Amino acid sequence: MGSIVVQTGTNLRMLCSAPDVHTPQSVSVQDLQHRLAAQHYVADYGLAVSLFLALRLGRPLFLEGEAGVGKTALAGAVAAALETDLIRLQCYEGLDVTHAVYEWDYARQLVELRILEASGDLDRSTARRELYGDTFLIKRPLLQAIDPARSRPAVLLIDEIDRADEEFEGYLLELLAEFQITIPELGTVRAAAPPLVILTSNRTREVHDALKRRCLYQWIEYPSFDKELAIVSARVPHAPARLASQVTALVHELRAMELYKLPGVSETLDWVAALAALDRDTLDPEIVEATLGVALKSRDDIDAVKGDALAGLVARAGSR
C-alpha cells in the first residue's frame, strides 16, 4: 500500500492517497502508530488501520466504546500528529444549528443598521449585503471545519453524538456526505479541503444506521493489561513503575466486578497521577480506600469495594 510525503498544508486525505510515492517520511499504518505514540497515544493495529483508511478514503471514522477508553483523546492525538487544528463539537440534548453550525450576530447587525440609517446610506440591497456577510457571521464548529478559507484541513471531532437528538443526526447527513452546509442568506458553503471527521459514541442510545453507513466503524475495547500499562507509562512518565503496574492491575480487578460504572483508562491515568502526587510508590488498602473517588464515581460502587473485599483486590494487584 503506497503513501505520500507529508508536507505543511497537505490535504489530510492526500496523506495516504498516492499509490506510487515512497519516501522515508511516507505515511503508512505503522507510521501512523508511531506518530500517535509520539503524542502519547497507544493505538493498536486495528485502530491504526481504521484511521489510515479514513484518511485514504476520505471517510468519517465512527468510534464506539465505553466511556474513558480513549475515543476523544484519539482526535486530539491525530490533530497533533498531523500538525493541524482540532475543532471539537460537544454534543448534548437540544443541540441545534445555532450552536453547532452558525448564527448571525444580531447585536452587531443592529448597530450597523443604525449607522447606515444615520449616514443616510440605507438602501435595501446594500444593507442586505452589508448585514449578511462574513463580518456578522458567527462560525460554529461545523462551519469552521468546512470553511473554504481554511488554509489546511482540520480534524473535526463530533463528540458523544449519542447525546444529541435524532433530528441533529439527520442534519449531519448532508455534511458527512458532501462536506457542505447551506446557509439561506449566503447559499451553499462547501469545503475546499474536507476535514477528517471523527465521531464518538458511548452508546447511551443507538445511533441511526443512516449516519453509521456514511462512516468507517471501530469499536474500542478496554485495553489489555500490557497495553494499558504502556498508556500509563507514556502519559504519566514520572510515576514509579511499580505503582503504575499495581494501579493498572487494580483497575482491571475493578472491571471484573459488577459495578455501576466501570473505571476507564482516563481514571487509571488520574489514579496513578494522584498517588504519584502523594509520593506513593506502592499500594496498600488504606491509601486505595482514601483515593477510591479518583477511579469510582458512584457511592454504591465505592461502598461495594470498601471493606473485606478491598484487601484482596490490593493483594492481587500487588502480585503483578
Image: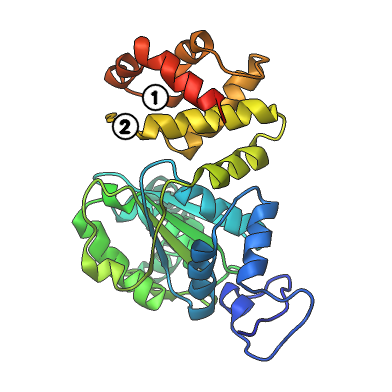
| Depth check, front residue: 254 or 279 | 254
* Image mark for residue 296: 1
Q: Neighbour class for label 1 at 10 Å: few (<14), some, many (≥20)?
A: many
| Depth check, front residue: 174 or 38 | 38
Hey, what amino acid is under mark 1? Leu
Residue visible at 43% across and 46% down? Answer: 222
User: Residue 15 falls in which quadrant of the image?
Assistant: bottom right
Please indicate whether residue 35 sits to the left or right of residue 89 in the image: right
Q: Colour scheme of this structure image?
A: rainbow
User: Residue 259 falls in which quadrant of the image?
Assistant: top left
Residue visible at 62% across and 44% down? Answer: 230
Choose the circle earlier in sequence order: 2 or 1. 2
Q: Could you say whether the residue bearing mark 2 is in a helix, strand or loop?
A: loop
Give the residue at the far right of this rendering: 24
Residue 134 in the image, given as x and y percentages of width and height = 49, 63
Residue 142 in the image, given as x and y percentages of width and height = 42, 60
| Depth check, front residue: 119 or 73 | 73
Residue 103 in the image, given as x and y percentages of width and height = 37, 54
The residue that disc 2 covers is 261
Q: Neighbour class for label 2 at 10 Å: few (<14), some, many (≥20)?
A: some
Please say if 207 is above or below 210. Answer: above
Do the residues bearing badges 2 and 1 touch, measured as CB atoms within 8 Å?
yes
Hey, what amino acid is under mark 2? Lys
User: Residue 272 falls in which quadrant of the image?
Assistant: top right
From mark 2 to mark 1, how far is it between C-alphas?
7 Å
Residue 279 in the image, given as x and y percentages of width and height = 68, 15
